[in-house]
Image (tube, helix red, strand yellow):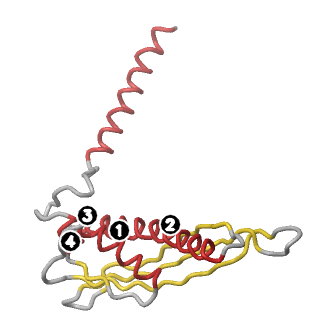
Amino acid sequence: MSHRREPTRRALVLGMLAAAGLGLAGCQIRPLYGTLPSGGTVRDDTRAIRIEAATTRVGQELRNELIFAFTGGGSAAAQPLYSLRIVLSEHESAVGVEKLADVPAAYFILVRASFVLTEIATGTTVLSGSSFASASYDFSTQRFANLRAKRDAEDRAVKVISDDIRTRIAAHFATAG
């Protein structure tokens, strides 16, 4: 009786392995920053992105993070092919109140970014999306400490948003090219 089950079990395992092999045969896993089938790289595409100027400190911080992420600290393309427009919004709310003083003990900052990547030559939208991040900071009786803590929280949120936008744009170029 056990002799009959063994060939059936082997056939079942071999069949499952063959099906898995066929399923993976069409898989095209490749490094995100490797050479694309077109011969270029994602880094070449991201260097060709012009990021529009920002009007706020948080917006400028996000712009700086993205410029560094796209160029790797090197120079951008002489002639940009794409334009990235980012619209930011920021919301701050108290999340804790000290018992006897009735003063906020901590704040929560939420930063949202909507972005649109367009091809400059045609004006066609290549990619659009939104991202958000939050950070908190403790509130104290020192005014400068509060300003610095808020700025640090904003910067932490901006780094998360920058990483998300960079990854999404790089993934787009890797799959499109």
Separation (CA) of disc 3 from disc 2: 27 Å
Q: Is residue 79 above or below residue 67?
A: below
| Disc 1 crowd, CA 10 A, few/some/many (<14, 14-19, 20+) | some
Mark 4 is on which residue type?
Asp
Q: Nearer the viewer, mark 3 or mark 1?
A: 1
Give the residue number, with chain letter if any, for mark 4: 45
Drawn side of residue 167 relative to residue 153, left or right: left
Task: Check the picture and name the quadrant holding the C terminus.
Answer: bottom left
Mark 1–mark 4 Cα distance, whole angstroms, equals 12 Å
Where in the figure is residue 139, as x and y percent of width and height? 69, 70
Three-letter amino acid code of the residue under disc 3: Ala
Q: Amino acid at mark 1?
A: Arg
Sequence order check, earlier mark of 1 and 2? 2
Q: Amino acid at mark 2?
A: Arg
| Nearer the camera: disc 2 or disc 4 | 2
Residue topped by disc 1: 166
Q: CA distance from mark 1 to mark 2?
A: 16 Å
The residue that label 2 is drawn on is 156
Q: Which mark is residue 174?
A: 3
